[in-house]
Amino acid sequence: MASASILKWFPGTLYNSALNVVVMQYKAVSHELRIFPPPVHFDVLYKLYKCGCLLELRGELCDLDVLTRMLKVVDKRHLLHHCFQALMDQALADHSTKISTVLSQTYVQRCNQVSSEQQQIDNLVLQGLAVSSFLAEAGWLPDAENILTACQALLADSEIPQQMTRSLECCHRLLHVQNGYCRFEEAERTYNQAMQLVKRLQSAGATPNLSSLYSEFSTLYMLRSNYAEAYSWSVKALQELVPNFPKPPLIDVLRQSAKACVLKREFKKAGLLIKQVSRISFLISSCM
């Protein structure tokens, strides 16, 4: 009897076989997919992608609620990017509307039609932050900007400190996107909105951490070749750091401060900051 080690074929797992059946019978079971837990639902969509069923995959991921659900499967976020890129490439080939544009238009429509109920506004804001972050990661910046602009408009008139803090987060992310493709006039408006929100929050006694926001200000001024202001804001960003500051944004703050130091010919300071970035990055990678 041949040993298992020399077999050229191994049977798939029961789970993978079940996924194959779901994909083959997709039209019959598609309306039932949302009763699955998000990780299982994601695996079905990824199997559609692997099997080349891009039309069915597009139908699923064009739904804003389905995408938001899939973003909860954080350990497979990179695979979701693979699916989206395939759909973007297909749209480019057949001259159809990009899926990122469909999603941003759907979100803006929801914002225009939302009621004044605070819970609905909160849920819509959180959805906008999640989806725009995903789009920005892949470089689909115009659509991310549209979502964040609509998201910001939902919170613009709020006087509640918690809502103003979320509005400031929207400004921070919007500024990051606008910096990403040099939308300087729009970035200037976002900068002014953020500064007004900071003053309003401080007047209300709230103390949000402003390190990442100040670092984004530094990036804006650096892109506009105002190196003195870029350096000044990078110093303020470092001064806002606290001991338990999250590691990924900490790396971003330190990197931007190092760039600003180089532009001001503060090479020793830049070297120290980069060494800190390398050490923190090593610690993160060793824990994964």
Image (cartoon, rainbow, N blue to C red):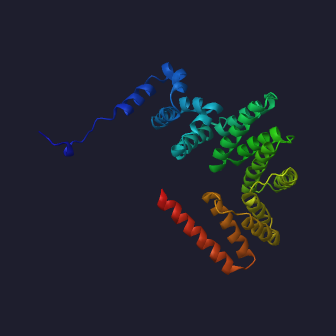
The correct choice, above or below, for 108 with respect to 265 in the image is above
Q: Who's the residue at 50% across and 60% down the image?
A: 285
Task: Give percent across and percent down for residue 43.
Answer: 47, 35
- Of all residues shown, which one is farthest toward the left? 1
Q: Who's the residue at 55% across and 64% down the image?
A: 281
The answer to whether residue 63 of the structure is visible from this angle is no
Q: Quadrant of the N terminus?
A: top left
The answer to whether residue 48 of the structure is visible from this angle is yes
Question: Is 40 placed left or right of 262 in the picture?
Answer: left
Question: Is 196 placed left or right of 37 in the picture?
Answer: right
- Of all residues shown, which one is farthest toward the front? 205
Taking depth in this image into account, of 96 and 180 the one nearest to the observer is: 180
Occupied quadrant, residue 120:
top right
The correct choice, above or below, for 36 with respect to 146 in the image is above
Taking depth in this image into account, of 253 and 143 the one nearest to the observer is: 253
Task: Give percent across and percent down for residue 137.
Answer: 63, 50
Task: Give percent across and percent down for residue 27.
Answer: 50, 21
Number of numbered labels in the structure image? 0
Occupied quadrant, residue 185:
bottom right
Occupied quadrant, residue 22:
top left
Question: Is 231 placed left or right of 4 in the picture?
Answer: right
Taking depth in this image into account, of 278 and 177 the one nearest to the observer is: 278
The correct choice, above or below, for 48 with respect to 191 in the image is above
- Of all residues shown, which one is farthest toward the top? 28
Q: Who's the residue at 60% across and 41% down the image?
A: 88
Task: Give percent across and percent down for residue 133.
Answer: 66, 46
